[in-house]
Amino acid sequence: MRVDFDYKHGLDELVADVLRSERICEDEQKKLMKEIGKTIKDEVVQILPKSEVGGKHKHMKDDVKVTVTGGKDGTSGVIVHGGKDTAYKWHMLDDGTRNPDGSVHTPAIHFTDKAMKRAESTIEKMLDDLEKRIAND
């Protein structure tokens, strides 16, 4: 007795479902990265002081940018950084600066660490929500 089993149709459907879920995950990942970047940016803006110096110079808190990266190897990330007018100032305000005699010139405010700490619970909730949405699809 010979039994033939046509598995191709079932396999095609399975592959289509996997590819669909990969696209969903990829789309969700991009959306999540943007949300995480916005959350961190909002915290950075809240922490950064407004400069007392007036004039035509852009303030750091008005020049915070978010970049979502995506590599060909499937890795992605989010970068919160200063814009072209203020990026060079970030390390000086974050880490502080010293005069040649060792005295403090600009006190360190560690705004990047503080922003990350403040955004941590919101980001964890975003990740949990994403897991739940993907698991229910």
Image (cartoon, rainbow, N blue to C red):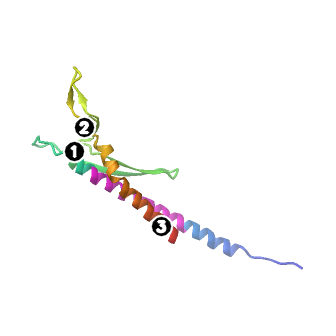
Given the image, on which type of amino acid does mark 2 rest?
Leu
The disc at residue 132 is 3
Q: Which mark is residue 134?
A: none
Quadrant for residue 87, please give it: top left
The answer to whether one can see residue 11 in this image is: yes
Q: Nearer the viewer, mark 1 or mark 3?
A: 3
* Cα separation between marks 2 and 3: 39 Å
Q: In the rendered structure, does residue 42 fall within the stretch colored magenta?
A: yes
Q: Quick check: 73 left or right of 42?
A: right
Q: Main secondary structure of the magenta part?
A: helix
Of 22 and 95, nearer the camera is 95
Question: How far separated are the C-alphas under marks 1 and 3?
Answer: 37 Å
Image position of 70 with respect to 12: above or below: above
Q: Nearer the viewer, mark 2 or mark 3?
A: 3
Asked if 130 appears above or below 41 in the picture, the reply is below
Which of discs 1 and 2 lies nearer the camera? The answer is 2
Q: State the residue at coordinates (32%, 56%).
A: 39
Crowding near pointer 1: few (<14 within 10 Å), some, many (20+)?
many
- Residue 60 image label: 1
Res 93 label: 2
Judged from the image, the secondary structure of the residue bearing numbered disc 2 is helix
Q: Looking at the image, do the residues carrying marks 1 and 3 touch, with CB atoms under 8 Å apart?
A: no
